[in-house]
Image: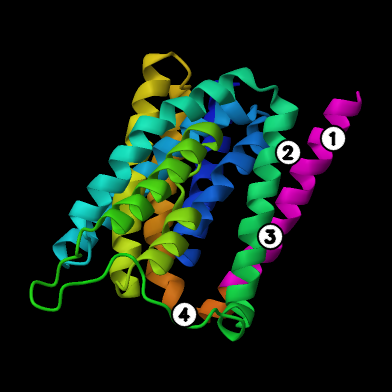
Amino acid sequence: MIYSVTLISLGLGGGVGLILGLTGAGGAIMAVPLLVFGLHLNVSQAAPIALLAVGLSAALGAVLGLRAGKVRYRAAGFIAATGIVVSPLGLWAARRLPNAPLAIIFAGVLGMVAWRMWRQGSGAAAATAAPPRTPPCLLNADTGRLRWTAPCARALAGTGVIAGFLSGLLGVGGGFVIVPALRRATDLPMQAIVGTSLAVIALVSASGVVAAAAGGHLDWAIALPFTLAAVAGMLAGRAVADRFPPRRLQQSFALFAALVAAAMLVKAVMALAA
């Protein structure tokens, strides 16, 4: 039985890592549903395991981004600090919500991510984009750093609050929140946004993992093989991602995510009706 659980954990982790490597940060949201369906865990049980895998994978990406000078570490630290403060509230709520309502919330979030990825893959998001406006966080042309103003601090803090709460509640990294928020709130280039997002995910996820482990809510027998396989899968996915058209990858992920969200919703509704 132990060996079968380990093998399944390795397989699921490898699948999550591959999706993450092929599609980017948003693919990490698949960790929880795969654990729910593959190992029959509750969302609250799967969440800290997913956080460990997502956090370690994001940390590797953030380190690479730091070496390349693509991470805005001050902004990342500020967003992460607010997220770390709020993350325990999400963990607290996850432990007290019944599994079925929690699964319905997760299915809704996953459905939203699927819809956004489909729009990005089809080009619809660009076609209906809002007219250009001045974001609250602007780069200083002389120093190359962000100008820290009160509106900028509020925008970044709000991003951290949402990402931190969802991280604790659902075990998601929050890249699907952080990346769009940074695109709206700053004039950073996309590579810097992604690198900064990965740094935030790594820091916030680490706090959630520590809190879950301290409370005895992290199943290491599943978490370790799942995480190691996820990292390996992510590296493999990144190595071959350039061979596939990005839009097709986004659309394929969106369809898969939509199906998983529908399955989670049906399972949760049936549990409520039972």
Please rate how many residues cluster around mark 2, counting C-alpha atoms within 10 Å: few if below 14, some from 14 to 19, many from 20: some
Give the main secondary structure, helix, strand or loop, of the magenta stretch. Answer: helix
The amino acid marked with disc number 3 is Phe
Check the image and name the residue furthest to the right. Answer: 273
In the rendered structure, the answer to whether residue 238 lies left or right of residue 189 reads: right
The amino acid marked with disc number 1 is Val
| Earlier residue among tags 3 and 2 | 2
Q: Which residues are magenta?
A: 250-274
Closest to the observer, 247 or 199: 199
Query: Does any portion of residue 60 appear in the rendered image?
Result: yes
The amino acid marked with disc number 4 is Arg
Look at 38% across and 45% down and name the residue there: 160
| Earlier residue among tags 1 and 2 | 2
Closest to the observer, 150 or 1: 150
**Which residue lies under the disc numbered 1?**
269
> Which dot marks residue 243?
4
